[in-house]
């Protein structure tokens, strides 16, 4: 959500809930909705843990919007006093941003590949290390929709074709690139095992070595890139980056295309052909 300049979905949910609460517990609210809401508050007062009010007020208490009262203390209040509580949507949004900022700053792992399996915030670690940019050039790229879709799926960790996201394999360290293992099998015992993630696809996969050095695509892998994923993903020609990523993913889907087939992508052209 941050990648696209949006608030976390939890923040959106909390603001909608606050709006529902404020609108339907006013004296002039529709009688049926007001009655239903007050009955739900009564469930909460009677120590029901699963009713909507219990979940909502627990959220508000954690965000410090209940005047310092805990959920247990709120249950002891009379019905009208609880229904008189009001919540500001803008303040809720600010509170959530603060919570998520603290969460991001607490993540001390800078390398997604070194983070232990199941580690907290792994998706954010990967985004911060490989993709995040305050400039957000990718949001302004003019390219065919299929290229933009591939670029955004790649940036957001939604390329489920990559083996690193194959959760049928319990151990992330075993989600290696089959193409690299097959190509290297003749020279290495058992084949070379490399985790197939976004970095591997761009910089390491042996089936794309020739492409990286071609006239057409070599400019994306210049000396200034030097294997830096974040620099690569945020370079100026986002249209060309999108085109390349789309092409790599398409080639990967076809097991009949091998490294020597990549002559078709070699050209003296340096621009993206849309």
Image: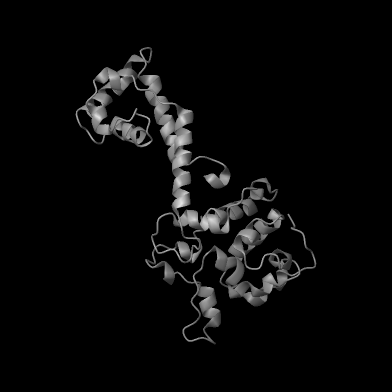
75 horizontally vs 235: left or right? left
Identify the image quadrant of residue 83: top left
Q: Looking at the image, which residue sits at the far left? A: 46
Quadrant position of the C terminus in the picture:
bottom right
Q: Nearer the viewer, residue 269 or 146?
A: 269
Disc tally is: 0
Q: Residue at x 37, y 20 (%)?
A: 24
User: From what the image shows, is residue 236 above or below residue 218?
Assistant: above
Visual colour scheme: one colour
Indicate the position of residue 11 as horizontal and vertical percent values: 45, 37
User: From what the image shows, is residue 22 above or below residue 207?
Assistant: above
Q: Residue at x 53, y 55 (%)?
A: 127
Q: Residue at x 80, y 67 (%)?
A: 268
Indicate the position of residue 149 as horizontal and vertical percent values: 60, 51
Indicate the position of residue 105 as horizontal and vertical percent values: 47, 50
31 horizontally vs 261: left or right? left
Q: Looking at the image, which residue sits at the far right? A: 268
Indicate the position of residue 162 as horizontal and vertical percent values: 51, 64
Identify the image quadrant of residue 42: top left
Q: Looking at the image, which residue sits at the far front? A: 68
Q: Nearer the viewer, residue 3 or 185?
A: 3
């Amino acid at each position: 959500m941050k990648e696209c300049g949006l608030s976390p979905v939890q923040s959106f949910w909390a603001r909608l809930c606050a709006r529902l609460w404020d609108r339907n517990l006013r004296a002039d609210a529709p009688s049926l909705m007001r009655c239903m809401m007050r009955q739900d508050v009564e469930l909460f007062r009677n120590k029901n843990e699963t009713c909507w009010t219990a979940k909502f007020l627990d959220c508000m208490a954690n965000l410090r919007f209940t005047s310092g009262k805990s959920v247990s203390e709120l249950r002891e209040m009379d019905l009208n006093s609880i229904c008189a509580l009001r919540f500001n949507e803008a303040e809720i949004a600010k509170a959530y941003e603060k919570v998520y900022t603290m969460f991001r700053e607490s993540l001390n792992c800078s390398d997604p590949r070194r983070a232990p399996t199941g580690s907290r915030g792994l998706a954010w670690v990967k985004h911060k290390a490989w993709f995040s940019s305050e400039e957000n050039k990718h949001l302004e790229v003019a390219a065919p929709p299929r290229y933009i879709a591939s670029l955004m799926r790649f940036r957001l960790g939604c390329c489920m074709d990559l083996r690193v996201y194959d959760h049928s394999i319990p151990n992330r360290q075993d989600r290696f690139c089959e193409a690299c293992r097959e190509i290297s099998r003749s020279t290495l015992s058992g084949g070379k095992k490399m985790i197939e993630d976004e970095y591997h696809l761009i910089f390491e996969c042996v089936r794309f070595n020739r492409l990286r050095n071609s006239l057409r695509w070599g400019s994306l892998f210049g000396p200034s890139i030097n294997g830096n994923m974040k620099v690569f993903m945020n370079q100026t020609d986002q249209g060309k980056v999108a085109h390349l990523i789309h092409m790599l993913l398409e080639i990967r889907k076809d097991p009949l295309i091998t490294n020597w087939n990549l002559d078709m992508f070699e050209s003296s052209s340096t621009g993206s052909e849309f």
